[in-house]
Structure formats: structure tokens, C-alpha cells
Image (cartoon, helix red, strand yellow):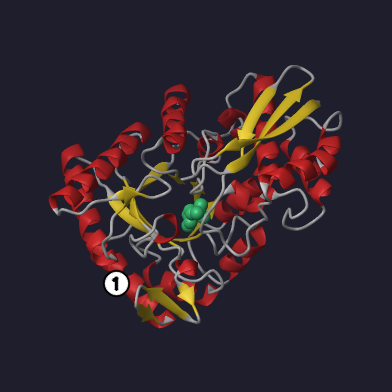
Amino acid sequence: LITSVRLRRILDSRGNPTVEADVLTESGGFGRAAAPSGASTGEYEAIELPPNEAISAARKHAVPRLVGEVHAGNQREVDGALRAADGTENFSEIGANSAVAISMAAAKAGADVLGAPLYQHLGGAFRGDNFPVPLGNVVGGGEHAKDATNIQEFLAAPVGAPSVAEAIFANADVHAKAAEILDERGIPAAKGDEGAWAPPVDDAEAFEIMDEAVEAVADDRGFEIKFGLDMAAAELFEDGEYHYGDETKSTEEQIDYVADLVNEYDLAYVEDPLDENDYEGFAELTDRVGDQTLICGDDLFVTNVERLQEGIDTDAANSILIKPNQIGTLTDAFDAIELATEHGYKSVISHRSGETEDTTIAHLAVATDAPFIKTGTVQGERTAKLNELIRIAEDAV
Ligand code: PGA
Ligand code: ZN
């Protein structure tokens, strides 16, 4: 039984306050987790409240329904109590940031009671032993950096890596190689929120740099490395057109552009290639290149089973991004992963641009046999998850 839930404000990687939760149980179980925070958030995400408000609302409405009432090890019960305490569809009462911090902290307390690692508690005895391929953000811009690329993320995808550790080190190599190439070209580069290089180049030059960096590291390491994109196209879309600096593209032009990019660069992955309301455009693109690449919905699906179901019904994509804080609880994230898997959609478990040292998503990816995880390449709040994956692999194989 949960005996205490403590909530506090801590710092995230952008230096903003975020919500951290501690959950204690009667038998001495302890779990601590913190909410991440997006910058290029989807229109249909659950609501993140200012941390102070989220904390006081959760203390008032959620804590009394948890303490002395539910077992930390029963995740559906915990998350059901959070939903009941909130009473809205989108956690606008207690905040998705309070909800997700409590949900994840309870899961960790439940694991602690059992003396099991979190991935084992969440995944259970019938869990597979697959490890996710890490998609590593190497170059980018968009909402994550000023005066850099229009496309938000250029991601290394070490699809041929023999182990998760090799994949993680390969991504770091691609990141270092990209820095070398930028230096050769005399291009100075700051870093964006997630630690990717944010050079003042156009998208075409970023493709060249990425292509060269990935090829060099693949040669060196002797396994296949591809790359992919998060276009975060909802951020480019305004007044019916996609804006790339001074240039614009119609929806048809955007679809042609992305299909051409998939062919030219043999892209492994394209996230949010179209606006978050454009199921039809997504479906057209998936029809054209979906057998060659993953078309992934982030802002399109927002980890929401209803939006995912609409995507399944319209053949809009073949992959979904999973961000627990977009929907508010681990149960909701699990349900989205399960629905996705049932319909052949590949799940990509993801960090946010604002992160903490919390490693829950590494465990979630292993627990659910997710084929991919997107959690950066370098920088402490990103390497926290990557290094946890290396440890889990050692433990679990
Ligand atoms: P966000 O970006 O966390 O700022 O939303 C990540 C993403 O779009 O995948
Ligand atoms: Zn995204």
C-alpha cells in the first residue's frame, strides 16, 4: 500500500522547474521519478501545468486517493486513481506533469517492493529479450535551436549494430564526426536543447553532413548505420503551407519532398512529416514510401489510443512515438504500445527536449520490446537513459 507521495519542484535540462515525485510503500518500497517537458508540443497533448499549480492540485486531489488506498505494484489501480482524481480527459486539473511523475514513481516503488529492476516489473516474465535501436539526434534546429536547420532533428539510426552498447557508441561517433565535418567546413555550431549540433546551415547542407558522418562511422565500425528525421512539420505548417525560411511548400509538394528524401538518402525513419491534423497526407506518404521507411506519428498521435486508432483506420503511418508525459500515465502509454504492436506499428519510446536524469523510458522500452528508443546521443540527461540501457543489457541477456 502507498503510504506517502511527496512532490517537489526540481530543475530540468533547460533550467526550468519540473515536477518530481517520491512514492513510499508500507513494506518500504521507494520510487522517485520526474516529468520531462516538450518545446515542440503537439496540439492534442495532455496538459502540462506550471509546476507549482500541478503540485498543489495533485496534493489536493490525487494524493488522498493514493495514500492508504492503492498498491504501488498495481499500475492500473495507481493510474486509475490519478485519472479519477483529475476527472478530465487531458489532465488539465492536476497536470500531466504531476500525473506522469507519480505514475512512474509508483512503478519504481512497485519494482522496489519486489526487488526487481523496473523493466522486469513492467515487462513481466514473458517479456522478450530484444533491445531497442537508439535513434541519436546529431544535427538539428526547429524549435530546439535558433538560427539552425528548419528540420528539427537529423537522427542516426544504427540499424545493423550487434548490440545496444555498440549502437550507443556508434551514435556518439556520428555526433563527433559531424562536429569534425562542420569544423572542416568552417561552420561554427552551438548545441540545441537535446545536445545535437545546431549549425547555421540550410537543410540541404545538413543532409550532406549527416550522410557523410553516418557513412564514415559505418565504414569504421563495420555495421550498417542509416539516418532519419523528425521534421516536426506541425511547427513548419502555417496558413495551409509548410514554411522553410522564405520558401513554402504545399501539402503535395511536402509529400513529394519527403518521398524524394527517403529515396535519395535511404532514410530509415521519418517522424511527423506532415501537420498534426493531416491524417490524409500522412496516409498518402505512407502509401508511397511506407514499405521503405518508418513513418512515425508524434504530434499526430500524442501517445493517445484514440488518435492512434484513427491512424490505423486510415493507414496514416506505420510507427508511433511514445512519450508518457503526452498522455499522463504509464498505463496509457502501455495501452498505446499494445494497440500499435497489434497493428504492426513500430513503437519508438521517446524523451522530450526538456529532460531530467530520470531513466524510466529506458526501462519502458525494454519492458515493452519496443524496436526503437529516441533519447539523444550525448549530454547527461540523455546519457542517463543510454547508460541505463547498457546496464540493463548486461543484466538481462
Ligand atoms: P519536444 O521535441 O520534446 O520539444 O516536443 C521532441 C520531438 O518532437 O520529438
Ligand atoms: Zn517529434
- Provide residue 256's location: percent of width, then percent of height: 34, 77
Q: Between 320 and 88, which is closer to the camera in this rendering?
A: 88
In the image, 66: left or right of 233? right
Residue sitting nearer the eye, 374 or 123: 374
In-image side of 303 versus 158 (left or right): right
Count the marks: how many?
Answer: 1
Measured as percent of width and height from the top left, residue 54 is found at 72, 46
Q: Which residue is mark 1?
A: 260
Q: Quadrant of the C terminus?
A: top left
**Do we see residue 346 in this rendering?**
no
Give me the residue at 31% from left, 49% from top: 190
Q: Quadrant of the N terminus?
A: top right
Picture quadrant where residue 387 is located: top left
* The residue positioned farthest toward the left in the image shown: 184
Residue 70 vs 226, above or below: the answer is above
Secondary-structure class at tag 1? helix
Q: Nearer the viewer, residue 324 or 60?
A: 60
Q: Is residue 253 left or right of residue 61?
A: left
